[in-house]
Amino acid sequence: MRKVQKEHINKITDYLWEIPQSFRQDMKVPARILAFETLLDDIIEDRSLNQLVNVATLPGIKKASFVMPDVHEGYGFPIGGVAATSYPHGAISPGGIGYDINCGVRLLVSQIQIEDIKPQLENLSKELYKQIPSGMGKGGQIRLTPSDMEEVLVKGAEWAIENGYGIKEDLYNIESNGKLDSADPSLVSDMAKKRGANQLGTIGSGNHFVEVDFVEEIYDKHIAEVYGLKKNQVVVLIHTGSRGLGHQVATDHIRIIMSAMSKYNIKVPDRELACVPFDSREGQNYFKAMCAAANYAWCNREVISWEVRNAWENIFGNKGGALNVLYDVAHNIAKIETHTIENTDQMVIVHRKGATRAFGPKSKELPKKYNEVGQPIIIPGSMGTCSYVLAGTSKSHETAFGSCCHGAGRRLSRRAAKKKVNAPALKEQLREKGIYVEAGSFKGIAEEAPIAYKDVNMVVETVSNSGIAKKIAKLIPVAVIKG
DNA sequence: ATGTAC
């Protein structure tokens, strides 16, 4: 299959590009890229645009396949991809969600100013590392009985609150209130449940982390105020997903879907793009299991917030104050949503893989307090660089089904990064920059080195210039906990 | 991302 070259890409604006449907006969819609030209030159190097073209062939796909400026190669779909298929007969493709179902980010806002805690930062990072289990395959303190597991998969974050690991108010500030109603635990295999039984409250490895930051800059005073953000305020970023449970759900159902495809006469240009009709038995079974795994992930981030709150109290005592959830947003998930396509409201199955929901003001799904200003979007940068809080706009609905980018986006493969980076030296460099890194392995540090990632500032400039999100605040890290 | 791998 011919590789996408720059000459195949039409420039629409400075930050929007299109591969026309005519590029390949099997495309059902065009493929669109949100990126500044400098980012595009990087993006074109790997297979992510070919994957984007493949996505444009999915049965029932609407409008266009999209990638965000932080795009890179993934399993089947590119990471940073968005695709909406018609409900209920269009395709559902596990590759469009990813192996880490409901990987996502949560931001906790503290009542403390950075200058008040500088002397305690080292102790705080050590305490966070102690309270939050991390690393490949690592379990935590909680052991879920089979009946607990059923409840976690059905109730999501609510389970944590009912069992003393969370605060009720948190629920209002989680996408979908931390629970998808279509979840069905009977479609999650015993193996998946077994892997998840001791991993609640753990971050895992790879790009997952818990990070302490402070607000360095406010771009929109009014919205920042509504979000409860002030200059120099300390915040905590949590990035993790559904751990071994979600991975097993993906593994199990990808296998089933791959062998069911021929029954529905579906052919895709890449076997990793395996899909079935959403309303088929296999499609429904995957979707219900995916929802259950998503609930596990929301429960996981709630329990991790509890661990962060415990560390906070242990270090700051009663001077620590509350840690409030600003928002918790998924970036590996499929959702049934209504979007305006060709002037009519249509229900679609929105696949977001390495892309976050970014709903604008007056969206029904938002908590009341964010109704006038739009959904908070949390964009973590790479380790040791800045992160951003953005707000959703109505333009995001017009552009890519109310979606936005999810982070800096990988530039080098894990392997290339490991080869290039001296991890102990990097840890020391970050320390000199004022960032404490607590990590289980140097391998993890090397793979997550800033040079392995795109420039998050350019990614954020793209989405803010294109109008699909509004810059609200910039966050600077001071402590990072990794696997 | 993941008890790195049919």
Image (tube, coloured by chain):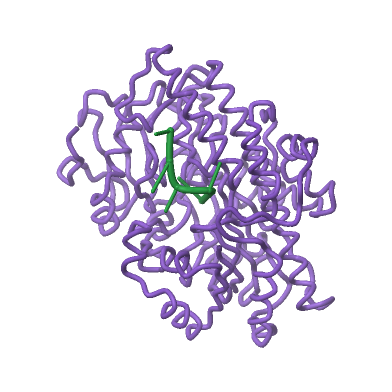
Chain colours: A purple, B green
Q: Which quarter shows the C terminus of chain A?
A: bottom right
Q: Position of residue A277 (x, y in %)?
A: 48, 19
Confirm whether residue A399 shows in the render: no
Q: Quadrant of the N terminus of chain A?
A: top left
Q: Is residue A306 left or right of residue A414?
A: right
Q: Nearer the viewer, residue A109 or A63?
A: A109
Q: Residue at x 43, y 20 (%)?
A: A259
Q: Residue at x 68, y 81 (%)?
A: A123
Q: Is residue A11 above or below residue A429?
A: above
Q: Residue at x 75, y 65 (%)?
A: A309
Which image quarter: residue A28? top left
Q: Does residue A304 appear anywhere in the picture?
A: yes
Q: Position of residue A150 (x, y in %)?
A: 75, 34
Q: Is A144 displayed left or right of A250 in the figure?
A: right
Residue that protrudes farthest toward the left in the picture? A7
Q: Residue at x 45, y 36 (%)?
A: A96
Q: Is residue A112 above or below residue A119?
A: above
* Number of residue marks: 0
The one nearer the camera, A244 or A280, is A244
Residue A165: x and y, percent?
80, 54
Q: Nearer the viewer, residue A194 or A77?
A: A194
Residue A248 placement, left or right of A406 = right
Q: Position of residue A32 (x, y in %)?
A: 32, 40
- Report the side of A302 relative to A192 (left or right): right
